[in-house]
Amino acid sequence: MRGKYSGNGGKAIVIGASAGGINALGFLFSELEEDFPFPLLVTKHVGAKDDGGALRVLARQSSLPVRLARDKDAIMAGTILLAPAGYHMQVEESGVISLNMEPPVAFVRPSIDVLFQSAARVYEHALVAIVLTGANSDGADGIRAVKDFGGTTVVQCPDSSMISTMPQASLGTGCVDYQLPLEEIPAFLDQL
Amino acid sequence: MTKTDSLAQLEHLELKLLLEAISQHYGYDFSDYARASMVRRIKKYMESVNVNRISALIPLFLHDGQAFQTFVESMSVVVTEMFRDPDVFKVLREEVIPVLKTYPFIKIWHAGCASGQEVYSIAIMLEEEGLLDRCQIYATDFNDEALRMAKKGIYPSDDVELYEKNYRDSGGRKTLSDNWVSQYNAIKINSRFAERITFASHNLVTDGAFGEMNLVMCRNVLIYFNEQLQDRALNLINESLCPRGFLCIGRRENLTFSEIRKSLEDVNNKLRIYRKKGA
């Protein structure tokens, strides 16, 4: 059952972004090819009342379909699912998304840590987790979990990040495999 | 003999054993809960009791009923808001309540009422529209602690600003604060609302249908269930609706794959408000 819907080789990509993240994600999504063979699950911090503004911006730039996740949506290769405002987004073993309204973690919901920790358990070494620009430390605990369960961890170079606090926090865990400038992340994903 | 199960496989086994122990000893069946969120809650509970393996909870729960009680309560106390998702309440007020007004008697079921803010929001709206005295409202939850909180109707004053904003955004035109009294750092919802509400223990996992409801509210409860249990709960809810009864689920919840979808028509699909087709 594991990674049933996750496409070729069962790999999956999770991405966390915060302040400055819309530009970074927009660039990334515009660079990916239409036949990208893995699912992408993305938690970008947004205010609780965000009505899908981030989605509209990203959908315009992406060559892949981008959708706001609904509870129990199937995780599919070549589809980008974005965590909706006000919910944590997690991955279930049956290959679907689950949403929950547990309290914010370190003041944020959706939380990057919550997504990464759940994906780490389900995909194990088939998971690639990427932390992009941001002004807090969300994602660091998640990166540690991804490493614990055998996944691959990537952090945007602080130098190439609009705000480097979040990449720095992840680097501080000592659990990061690759530190890449934003421009090199699409090529990295292509060779997976 | 050496075994090389991965950390994930071991945790999976530990969780299975823990849920089996809970089910056999206490009769709570969590096996069809969505795993990811459950694992998070279990991990959080483990931190609070300073335990670092899921399997270490088995002896704890088997021999310490109080510890288990605390755990169960931590599994499901969800804190909600009054008039959360104001546009949902707006549609309920403008499109659902006018239909309910044509009935002599109205039965409403709030399934999974948690700490109660939402059921009071509905009751306040019904009173403003002049039909609260014709309504019987059932508010249920399987968590006794949540039910106690809901029955009391006491909430922190810090949340008042948000409640009032939500209320105005939902089209409310009266003074929301007329519905409670402030005491110290809390508000207490006027008891005339609780008098119209029957608070009862009900478990969507194991209990049966509730009869002939004109409106069922079940928002952000199903997200904690896996696909199979969601299906069961949705069927139970559908059975509980009278013909032409209304159903409102959470905004990011998903009826697409449920067999009850075909027996419902849209009131507002985007806001997840539906109406059961005629008999």
Image (spheres, coloured by chain):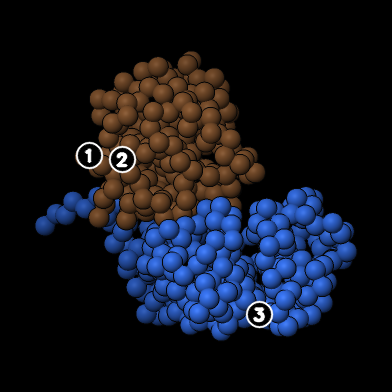
Chain colours: A brown, B blue
Q: Is residue B264 above or below residue B28?
A: above
> What's the residue type where badge 3 is placed?
Lys
Residue indicated by mark 1: A8
Could you tell me which secondary element the residue under label 2 belongs to?
loop
Marks 2, 3: nearer the viewer: 3
The quarter of the picture where residue B59 lies is: bottom left
Do badges 2 and 3 share one subunit?
Answer: no
Closer to the eye: label 3 or 1? 3
Is B55 drawn above or below residue A136 in the view shown? below
Dot 3: element: strand
For this orientation, the residue located farthest to the front is: B278
In the picture, residue B273 is in which quadrant?
bottom right
Is there CB contact under 8 Å for labels 1 and 2?
A: yes
Image-based side of B187 in relation to A3, left or right? right
Residue type of the residue flagged with mark 2? Ala
Between discs 1 and 2, the one toward the N terminus = 1
Give percent across and percent down for residue B94: 72, 60
> Which residue is denoted by mark 3 in the rendering?
B107
Circle 2: is it few (<14), some (14-19), or many (20+) Cα within 10 Å?
some
Kindly identify the residue that appears in the image at 46 percent across and 46 percent down: A69
- Residue underneath mark 2: A77
